[in-house]
Image (cartoon, rainbow, N blue to C red):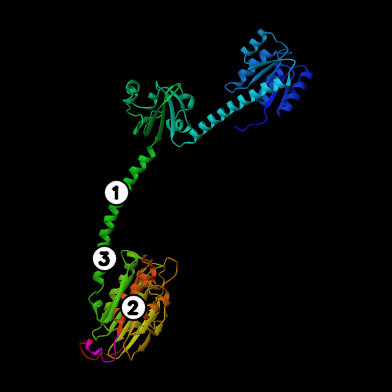
Amino acid sequence: MVEKNLKVLVADDIETNRRLVASFLARLGCQVEFAEDGLQVVEAFERCRPDVVLMDLMMPRMDGFEAISRIRTLAGERWIPIIILSALSCEEDMVRGLAVGADDYLTKPLSFPLFEARFGALRRLLMVQRALQDSLQEVHALADALIDGVITADERGQILDANQAACRIFGYALHELRGQNLRVLMPNPHRDNHDHYLKRYLDSGAPSVIGKIRELIALRRDGTPFPMELGVTALQLPSGIRLLGVVRDVSERRRMERRLAEDAERLRRYHEESEREQELAMSIMERQLRSDWLQDDAVQYSVMPARNFSGDVVAVARSTNGLLYALLADATGHGLAAAVSVLPALGAFYRMAVADATLEDMAVELNGLLCELLPGGRFVAAAMVCLDEVRSQGRVWVGGVPEVLRVSQDGKVVQRFKSAHVPLGIVPQERSEMSTESFDWREPCQLVLCSDGLTEAENPFGEPFGLGGLERALGQSRAEHRVSDLRAALVQHLERQPASDDVSLLVLECPAPGEGLASFPGGLSPWL
């Protein structure tokens, strides 16, 4: 406790005496309140709650002896030093004054050195008492601030004290717990056997619960049982053995554990069912994709899904006349939902490719099909290519994916085909709106198609791979390993962290004029 100026209540019916005492106390740095008789001093005590009372004995209306007795009753457990200042110096008066509750006795006339010495000793005692009282209040405040309940009992199991948490857990007020035996907090058979447990510990020193944390069933005031964790410590104090119990209501924890176990079981069943559904979906996807056509010597490809399923699809097909058709599609989103969005387009693509359909007709057909089947907000960005390797001619349609690049054998970009259309499945369009770009080549080259999962892939610093990164990687790649080299460049850019979107790559060979003849079973193939 920090020392402070003491508030002193002075009771004396003679003004000269009050002034003298006031001058002494002023020199000692005290605040002073005055009363002129016994009734006034009792009223002033209740009003100002002083730290010290200086009491004359001979006063009107109520003498000092009666006033001291009443003040002690009002103070209760709080110690307020009371010093008698009186001209009565006989032993009988001193004894009587101390007997009714005074702490010291000074006779008038007062000597300031003696008054200062006695008052200083009293101040030190008061400071020690207040420091102990503050410490005790801090201990109680800390105990009440604990989440866990704390209960103190003596060696007979009688409850001496409990913090707020313990009262809340068991449903008792503190005054209801004090004096009760610990038995009231437990159901049978422990209730009936508790005294035996305690006696066995006191007689033998062999702990059964002492020093351990155990879970057991406790009993609330209303008779409701609940699971509780209990840790008991035995303390040997000068006043005797004290049992300190720390209790924790684990009802909510047990409910949460049961709920988590039930949730885990539901999650396990859901996971197993999801895996079965995914296996079925994967089987359907594999049946839709003509993976044998992807083994064409003129094709290099890679699809890297962000999840189990990729919303990106690459497909190639040979027409009856040997034309090479290719599709790279990127559906909205990721996973199974995105993969399902592409499925309707695959069957139409293969059917029309085999029939030597034009890219314009193919784009109109796929767009109409997806507009009819996909819900709002779902669409498929795509690029489609048709190559006549005999005539060294090709056509390209791009809607919503990064630009298609024609690159030389050493990876330099020689032509760009930018997206000129909205993705498939957004709005119906006529054939006249589905224009394509044509090109031809005189030297062997390649067409490079990719989804935006490649160009938008960010490294740990938030830097995208971008078209610039794609072109740099193309310049450093080998024609026969174009896709694998591009994948390696992407992995290096990502610093081995996973991509956030599906990534697909498709590279088509455009052979030197005359080299494509062997690819066509009927010799020359008609150009569209």
Labels 1 and 2: the sequence-earlier one = 1
User: What is the number of the mark on residue 365?
Assistant: 2
Q: Main secondary structure of the magenta part?
A: loop
The type of residue carrying mark 1 is Glu
Q: Is residue 516 magenta?
A: yes
Q: Of all residues shown, which one is farthest toward the right?
A: 16
Asked whether residue 128 is drawn in magenta, I would say no
Name the residue nearer the viewer: 171 or 472: 472
Task: Specify whether residue 229 is in view.
Answer: yes
Real-space Cα distance between discs 3 and 2? 25 Å
Residue farthest toward the left in the current orientation of the protein:
521
Sequence order check, earlier mark of 3 and 1: 1
Q: Is residue 47 above or below residue 445?
A: above
**Residue 287, quarter of picture:** bottom left
Q: Nearer the viewer, mark 3 or mark 2?
A: 3
Horizontal side of 34 relative to 503 (left or right) equals right
Q: Is residue 128 above or below residue 270?
A: above
**Residue corresponding to mark 1:** 265
Residue occupied by mark 3: 282
Label whose residue precedes the other's in the sequence (3 or 2): 3
| Badge 1 density bin: few <14, some 14–19, many ≥20, Cα 10 Å | few
Q: Is residue 450 above or below residue 168?
A: below
Amino acid at dot 3: Met
Place of residue 174 in the rendered image (x, y in percent of width and height, measured from the top left):
48, 27
Viewer-side label of 1, 2 = 1
CB within 8 Å, label 3 to label 1:
no
Range drawn in magenta: 510-518
